[in-house]
Image: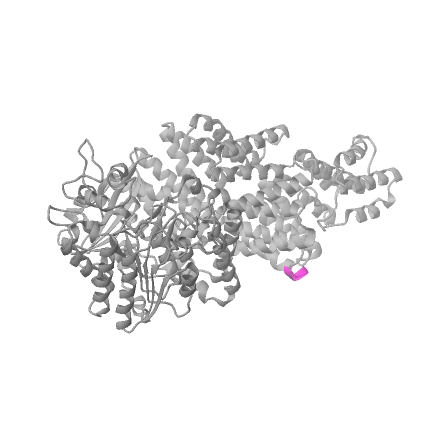
Amino acid sequence: MMIDLKLGIWRSAIAMVVLSQSLSFQLAAQSGSIKDIITSADKLLNAKKSQEALDLLEPVLSSQKVLSPADSVDLFNLTGDGYYQLQQFSKALNNYKLALNATAINDTIRARIYNQIGLTNYRLSDYAGAVNSIIQARNLYKQLFGTKDTKYTQTLNTLGFLYNVQAKYSEAEKTFQEARQLSFQINGGEDIQYARIANNLAMVYCRLNRFDKADELFQTSLRIKEKLSGKRTKDYANSLYNVADYYSDLGRYEKAIHCIQDGIGIFNSLNDTTHADYFKFLDYLALLKEKLKDRDGAEKLFKESLLRREKASLTDRDDYALNLLNLANLFIGAKEYKSAYPYAEKATQLILKIYGKNHPTYAHALITLATIQSKQNENEQASKNFKNAVQIIQSSLGSDHIEYFNAQMGYARFLRKSGQNAEAVAIIKKVNAVPRNYLKRVGRFLSEKELSEKVSEFVDYIHEIYSFVRELPNDHDLCTMAYDLNLFYRSYILNHMQRMRINLYKAKQVNEARDEVISLHRQLENELNRPVSERDNTAELESRISEKEAEISRKIGSFADDDATVKWDDVRMALTEEDAAIEFISFPEAEHGDSIFYGSLVLRNGMEQPTYVDLCSESDLAAIIQTKGGRTSDYVAALYDFSNRGAAAVEAKRKSLAEMVWKPLGQNLSGVKKVYLVTDGLIHRIAFSAIPLTMESFVSDSFELVYLSSSKQVLPDDQKIMSYTGKRTLIVGGVNYDSESGELVASRSGNQTTKQWSYLPWAAKESQDVTDIFKSAAYNVSYLKGMDASEKNVLDSLVSLEGFRVLHFATHGYFKGSAPAEQGGSNYYGKGLVNSALVLSGANNASSTERKSDTEDGFLTAYAISKLDLSKTELVVLSACETALGDIHEIEGVFGMQRAFKLAGASQLILSLWQIPDRETKDFMLSFYKNWLSNQFSVREAFNKTQAEFRQRFVNPYQWAGFILLE
């Protein structure tokens, strides 16, 4: 946080008094020599030649010459200004006090000196003294000039800032609001003073997490400052610092870094790299590097800033204390607790001296100290410090603030570690809703990428709850909180972006921005389709997309659905006595941080709480379901055979798939006929219908299985059901991949290393037969085949305003897991969504020299699909290989075709888990559509009926269990 008062060099611009004019009047009766000295010193100070001015003034003050009161005021006042400019604040304060003693009681100069004493006390971290002096200045200006005067509003601005520093946010807001209203009345809200007030009020709203109010104020401040004085002033740099703090609060770290680097550039261009404010920029850059996992870069900057401050004798200030605290936290992050302790201890003592014992900064220092103490088993002292910190933050920021949540969770982790489980659970229950409320507040300002980064900040908290539930599976509060966490966080970004996208297409005021976002996304997709080494400006494009999406979010605002938080008991009430909902979860094991464990939360109608069930470790599960080869018939037969123990032979006895993920659930499913499944991690690759229970029976023989993105979908949604009344269908199949050679294959897949995609004769027949079935059901069918099944034609069809009720793709599917080189950096949009695609006409030219288009390559990526509006689409059928797969994204699930179509607004999807056989797929699809379009069955009923029919026809699950219906 940086004060916006033009500190140190503001004296000529402060507009409280034109000092040179007052001096000429006051010095008329003085000797020529003293008058000349004062005039010359004043000019030197205005030219920022502080030391030269002091060289003129100090000999006069140190002489025994008797001075008139007027001369004394001017000499001490100017000397104070000189030391202030040199950042020698103790000397400045002494001279200002001497000047004050020589002034008249009701004098403009006296008010100005009170103001300078207040600013100097702030620089000396004496906030109580600063507030008292500024109040004196404010009262005197009000007495002399009234409230509609710039001098009065400026002291209000200073006073509001000081309240903010002291965490007196209510007083700060009221003071800034008064200053803002008066400034607007005086100058119309377009002068530098109004810009500074807007900036400072925005900082208060940031501290209160009221980002909706902060955003507009920051933009106003920057616009006015740029208009009046350009972008190369310290004043503008101060605003950049505060905007960076705002971006950081929102999780927009790249934008924050950009602001800080611009601010550092301003100081460098002004050759002022010894100023205390410059060191703050270095500190913040280090903090941002730490957030972006550049620990070495952060440590280097923190230590450089610390040494610069020590060299400049600035070791008694708050920013020096924060510098120490930041270093301590950096070492804590690296688990170097002994290195962290001396920095934390020194910082805590200095912060207490500066801020007092009721300030949130002191609370943060106590938390840092307590964290170290808990790691060193100093439990009594750690507990005391955690408690104290929590009380301070609650008093100053409130119990719905995210910092209160962080403080309480730190304390809860300590209590759990020390065996005080009941106390830890009580605290977690108390603050459980805070992150949800916080995300609702910040969500409207963030793009999809930024929102994902913000949600990721709570991953450790979510995992903490999961692991705690595993430790105490019978604890009612933990089990209900864990289930509620899943309901809120799982697919939270997906649901948020669905709502925003639907409103985006409806809101006229953002049409231009919407079109620009669509264009930018298409450019980005083209870049992401290139090899990493050939990509140009993905970071710039992603930044522009983030800005535009955030702009749209601000204009559209929040949506009613955001506030309708579904809880576990809502789901329970929606279940019948024969239903069960299972939310699978994965999390690091508490005792082995690098080991991932799978569990499940089972919910039934009569339960008093969700039931936690232990399943298996990820390493054990991966050993039987992951394969280096293709997911072919042999793979499926081995994985789902009752007598086998996985996809590969092993020497040691290994649990079967059923023993890992299904049989542990058994006692909770007595009397159940329908099971709602919400998968997580590697479990999304499992065909539960094909898990063998005996030599002759599978899970699907005993249960109706329903795949959901979240179990909150079991709640009735009549409006959505009634909305699908259209009778238009788009069918894509019989695709000409422009291959003159290549062996025909029996599955709709391609090896990711091959350069040729082979024609699929059964897919062509399937597409024609499906077309005939829909036409016989009086549907209007658009059938794209051969070379007409191009990326452009498909996309042009999908952007139709009328929309399609059904989309059917019979073609090759493509999924390539993200390579390590593609997982770093800012490549959020490309992860999974570009690596999954449907193969269309001309795809065989994509890797050849014949490729002529930079925007069309024959691959309809999940990324491109995700930008469409498919809210009128009831069913998407992906009659292709591995369309249910994708990159696993923590908390949000799978990034691939299923996420893309869900983002676009489609309701139900039929997807494949493995490399499906071509002919059997054709038969499956024809049977499914006949069942559904007979009007006797819903989509779900028709799908289950078809799968049961094929279960009777084929022994190997490869031929009947590869498709899932995701709702």
Toward the viewer: 410 or 566? 566
Whether residue 776 appears in this view of the structure is: yes
Colour setup of the view: one colour
Quadrant assignment for the N terminus = top right
Q: Nearer the viewer, residue 22 or 709?
A: 709
Quadrant position of the C terminus in the picture: bottom left
Q: Is 887 displayed left or right of 107 in the figure?
A: left
Question: In which image quadrant can residue 505 be found?
Answer: bottom left
> Residue placed at 25% from the left, 42% from the top?
625
Outermost residue, top side: 338
* The one of 440 and 794 positioned closer to us in this rendering: 794
Q: Splitting the image into 4 quarters, where does residue 36 fall?
A: top right
The boundaries of the magenta stretch are: 184-188
Q: Position of residue 311 (x, y in %)?
A: 63, 28
Residue 138, horizontal then vertical, whole percent: 65, 51
| Residue 681, horizontal then vertical, whole percent | 30, 45
Instruction: Give the prevailing secondary structure in the magenta stretch.
Output: helix
Residue drawn at (68%, 50%) of the image: 230
Q: Using the image, determine if residue 688 lies above or below residue 726.
A: above
Front residue (pair 108, 751): 751
Residue at x-position 39% and y-position 43%: 818
